[in-house]
C-alpha cells in the first residue's frame, strides 16, 4: 500500500493518531512524576505505527485485544482519551470507572476487549471474539495484539492451533520490541516467530513497525483474508520501545547509544513527516496544526482527569457480578 | 413424574436451552467424541455421556470438539461470552482447571469488575469432580472451595437429578461466569425429573430432610452420605435435618443461619480438603452470626488434608462416610 493510495483525510488521521499516542505517553510519563497517576504504566511510545497501521484497517464493530502496553492500541481503536486519562488517574469518569487502571483499559463499544495484565492471555480471548463473529454470521474480525514475550507462553501456540482448526477471522499481531521486560528476546526465544506460526499453516508477514504504510498494507492483507473467511494470519512487526519496560524502569540494560540511535533512526513520526514531504501530500503547516490540536486535547484530558472525582467507596464492591443475591 | 438419571437430567437441560437460545454454544474435549473419525458420530457424548445427541441436534458449529488445550478453549469461551454468545465449556475433569486457571480467575472472573461494570460474561464452565472412581490424585479432586474463594465466579454443586437440571438451566441463563460441578459418582443416580424446563434460583438452599436434633449441612455428593447417616441416626433416636446449599457462591446464608438458630447443633460434611474450605467458611459464618444459638461445637467431617489416593482402601478412607457423619452428629446430639 503506497501512501499515494490513501486519502488526504486518512493520512491526516494516521498522523494525528500516532501523534496522539506519542504525546499521550510522554504526558503520562511526566504525570507519573507528579505522583497523581498511581501505580505504574507500560508505555507504548515508539510503537505507534503498528497500532495505527493495523487499526486503520478495522471497522468500529471489529474487535481488538491488547497487552499490558495497551494505551496505543486503545487510542488507535478509537477509545476516548479523556476517559483513558481519567482511568489512569483512577477517577470515576475513567473508561472502567477507575477500577481497571492502565493494564485493564477496555471499551467494548469501540471493540476494545481490554489491555491485559497477563502476558498472552488476550490471544485465546480474541479467538473467542472471532468465534462469536463466525457463529453469529457477522463479517467482523478480531485482532490480538501481543508482544515478543507472549510468544513464549504456551497459550499463544494453543491459540494459533485453535484459530487454524476453527478457521477463525483473526489476526495475530506480534509486536516485537526486542525485550520481554528487561530480558532480550534474542536470549530467550528459540527459532523464528514466523516459522512457529507457519508450522500451524498460518500465513505470516514480517513488517517494519516504524513504517505505518508497511503495517497498513500487511494488516490489509490479513484483515481481508479474515473477513473473507480465509482464517488467521500472523504479523511479526518489529518496533522500537522508547521507554523501559514500565514507567519506573531505569532501563540500564540498554546503552545510552542504543537508545539514542533508536530514537534518531526509528521514529515513525519523523519518517512519516519525511515521507509526506517527499511525495508532497501533506503540508508541514498542516502537520504542525495537528501537533497543536493534539497538545490541546491532551492538556484538556489531563486537566479534566485531575479535576474529576475518585469513585465513591460504594464502587468497591459493585459490579463484581451482574446479579448476585 | 418421570424417573431420570443425573446424566439424563443434564442432557435434557442442554438440549432444551440450545434449542431455545441460538447464542448458546458448547465446547470441550470429546464433547461429541468421534467427530472427525470414520465411525459413528456422537460416539461418546463426552467422557461421561452427558452431551450425547447434541451434535446431531445442533451441528458442529454449535457443538465444538476442542483440542486438548484448556487454556485456549476456556479463554475462547470467555472471549465469546464477552462478545455476544452464551458458551458452555466443559473441563472433563476439574483437576485440569490447573492448566487454564488464568483464564478462569484472572480473565472471566474479572472482566465485569475491571471494566467498570461495562461487560458481562455469560459463561458456564461444566466440570466433573470427586473421588470414588479409583482414578488417582489428578482426576478426583473437589475444588469448589478454590472457585468459591474467587469473587466474580458463581459456583454450583448439585446433589440430585432434579437440581442438576434446574440449576444448569439457571446457570446458562445467568449473565455471570458460573462453575458448574458434577460429581462423577452421581451420574447414574436416579430421581424424579420433570420433562419440561424449570429453573432453580441460586442461593436457595434445599432442605433435603427435616429434623430437630442435629443440623447436617452437606455439599454435593455428600448430601447422599448425610442421608444415609440420618437413617442410621434415626434408628438411634436422633432426628437429623439435612440442608444442601446447592450453590456455594452465592451462599444462602439466611437458611443456614435460621436452621442453626433453630437446632443449635451443626455438622458440616464436605468431600473437599479441609483447609481454607467451604466447610470452614460456613463454620466461621455460623460461629460469627449464630454463636449464641450453638449448644455444642460445630463439627466438620471432611476429607483429610491430603491428595486423593489410588489404593481402594485408602480412597474409601479418604471420602467422608455415613458412619463418620453419624458419629460426629451423635457426639454433639446429647450435649
Image (spheres, coloured by chain):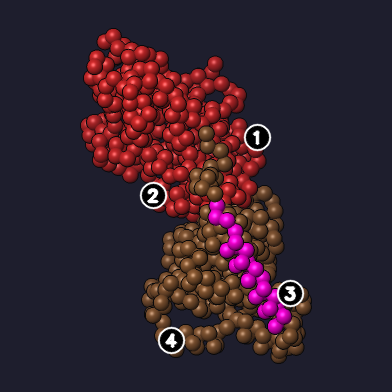
Chain colours: A brown, B red
Q: CA distance from mark 1 to mark 3?
A: 45 Å
Q: Tell me, for residue A256, which label it has, or none.
A: 4
Q: Read off the residue under disc 3.
A: A10
User: Residue A56: x and y, percent?
Assistant: 68, 69
Co-location on one chain, circles 1 and 3:
no
Left or right: B226 in relation to B35: left
Q: Give above or below for A30 relative to A165.
A: below
- What residue is shown at x 55% (from left), y 84% (from top)? A266
> In terms of secondary structure, what is the magenta stretch mainly?
helix
**Quick check: is A298 in the magenta stretch?**
yes
- What residue is shown at x 47% (from left), y 20% (from top)? B191
Bounds of the magenta span? Answer: A288-311
Instruction: Look at the numbered disc 2 and give the secondary structure of its residue.
Output: helix
- Between disc 1 and disc 2, whose residue precedes? 1
Examine the image and state in which quarter residue A190 appears: bottom left
Q: Read off the residue under disc 1.
A: B20
Residue depth check, mark 1 versus mark 3: number of the one nearer the observer:
3
Amino acid at each position: 500500500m503506497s501512501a499515494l493510495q490513501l486519502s488526504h483525510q486518512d493520512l491526516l488521521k494516521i498522523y494525528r493518531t500516532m501523534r496522539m499516542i506519542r504525546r499521550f505517553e510522554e504526558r503520562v510519563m511526566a504525570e507519573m512524576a507528579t505522583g497523581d497517576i498511581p501505580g505504574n504504566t507500560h508505555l507504548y511510545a515508539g510503537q505507534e505505527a503498528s497500532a495505527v497501521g493495523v487499526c486503520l484497517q478495522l471497522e468500529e464493530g471489529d474487535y481488538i485485544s491488547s497487552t499490558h502496553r495497551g494505551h496505543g492500541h486503545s487510542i488507535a481503536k478509537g477509545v476516548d482519551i479523556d476517559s483513558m486519562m481519567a482511568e489512569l488517574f483512577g477517577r470515576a469518569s475513567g473508561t472502567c470507572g477507575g477500577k481497571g487502571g492502565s493494564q485493564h483499559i477496555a471499551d467494548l463499544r469501540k471493540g476494545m476487549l481490554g489491555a491485559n495484565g497477563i502476558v498472552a492471555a488476550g490471544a485465546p480471548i480474541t479467538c473467542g471474539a472471532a468465534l462469536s463473529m463466525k457463529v453469529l454470521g457477522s463479517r467482523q474480525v478480531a485482532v490480538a495484539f501481543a508482544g515478543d514475550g507472549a510468544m513464549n507462553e504456551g497459550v499463544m501456540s494453543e491459540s494459533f492451533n485453535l484459530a487454524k482448526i476453527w478457521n477463525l477471522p483473526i489476526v495475530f499481531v506480534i509486536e516485537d520490541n526486542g525485550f520481554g521486560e528487561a530480558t532480550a528476546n534474542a536470549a530467550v526465544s528459540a527459532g523464528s516467530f514466523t516459522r512457529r506460526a507457519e508450522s500451524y499453516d498460518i500465513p505470516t508477514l514480517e513488517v517494519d513497525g516504524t513504517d505505518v504504510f508497511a503495517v497498513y498494507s500487511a494488516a490489509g492483507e490479513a484483515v481481508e483474508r479474515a473477513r473473507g473467511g480465509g482464517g488467521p494470519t500472523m504479523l511479526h512487526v518489529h518496533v522500537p520501545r522508547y521507554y523501559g519496560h514500565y514507567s519506573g524502569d531505569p532501563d540500564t540494560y540498554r546503552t545510552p547509544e542504543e537508545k539514542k540511535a533508536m530514537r534518531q533512526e526509528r521514529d515513525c513520526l519523523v519518517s512519516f513527516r519525511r515521507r509526506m514531504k517527499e511525495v508532497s501530500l501533506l503540508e508541514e503547516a498542516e502537520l504542525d496544526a495537528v501537533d497543536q490540536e493534539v497538545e490541546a486535547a491532551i492538556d484538556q484530558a489531563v486537566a479534566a482527569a485531575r479535576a474529576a472525582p475518585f469513585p465513591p467507596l460504594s464502587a468497591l464492591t459493585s459490579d463484581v457480578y451482574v446479579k448476585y443475591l | 413424574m418421570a424417573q431420570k438419571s443425573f446424566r439424563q437430567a443434564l442432557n435434557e437441560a442442554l438440549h432444551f436451552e440450545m434449542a431455545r437460545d441460538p447464542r448458546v454454544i458448547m465446547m470441550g474435549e470429546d464433547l461429541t467424541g468421534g467427530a472427525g473419525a470414520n465411525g459413528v458420530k456422537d460416539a461418546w457424548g463426552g467422557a461421561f455421556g452427558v452431551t450425547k445427541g447434541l451434535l446431531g441436534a445442533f451441528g458442529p458449529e454449535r457443538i465444538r470438539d476442542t483440542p486438548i488445550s484448556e487454556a485456549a478453549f476456556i479463554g475462547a469461551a470467555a472471549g465469546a461470552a464477552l462478545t455476544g454468545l452464551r458458551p458452555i465449556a466443559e473441563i472433563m475433569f476439574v483437576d485440569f482447571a490447573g492448566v487454564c486457571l488464568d483464564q478462569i480467575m484472572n480473565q472471566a472472573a474479572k472482566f465485569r469488575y475491571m471494566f467498570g461494570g461495562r461487560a458481562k460474561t455469560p459463561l458456564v464452565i461444566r466440570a466433573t469432580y470427586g473421588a470414588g472412581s479409583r482414578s488417582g490424585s489428578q482426576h478426583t479432586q473437589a475444588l469448589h472451595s478454590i472457585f468459591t474463594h474467587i469473587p466474580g465466579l458463581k459456583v454450583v454443586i448439585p446433589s440430585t437429578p432434579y437440581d442438576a437440571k434446574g440449576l444448569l438451566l439457571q446457570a446458562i441463563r445467568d449473565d455471570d461466569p458460573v462453575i458448574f460441578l458434577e460429581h462423577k459418582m452421581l451420574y447414574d443416580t436416579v430421581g424424579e425429573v420433570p420433562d419440561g424446563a424449570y429453573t432453580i434460583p441460586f442461593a436457595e438452599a434445599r432442605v433435603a430432610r427435616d429434623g430437630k436434633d442435629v443440623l447436617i449441612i452437606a455439599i454435593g455428593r455428600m448430601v447422599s452420605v448425610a442421608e444415609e447417616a440420618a437413617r442410621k441416626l434415626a434408628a438411634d433416636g436422633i432426628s437429623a435435618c439435612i440442608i444442601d446449599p446447592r450453590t456455594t457462591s452465592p451462599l444462602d446464608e439466611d437458611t443456614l443461619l435460621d436452621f442453626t438458630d433453630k437446632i443449635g447443633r451443626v455438622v458440616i460434611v464436605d468431600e473437599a480438603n479441609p483447609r481454607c474450605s467451604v466447610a470452614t467458611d460456613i463454620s466461621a459464618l455460623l460461629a460469627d452470626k449464630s454463636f449464641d444459638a450453638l449448644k455444642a461445637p460445630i463439627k466438620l467431617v471432611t476429607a483429610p488434608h491430603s491428595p486423593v489416593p489410588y489404593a481402594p482402601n485408602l480412597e474409601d478412607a479418604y471420602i467422608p462416610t455415613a458412619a463418620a457423619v453419624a458419629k460426629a452428629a451423635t457426639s454433639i446430639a446429647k450435649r
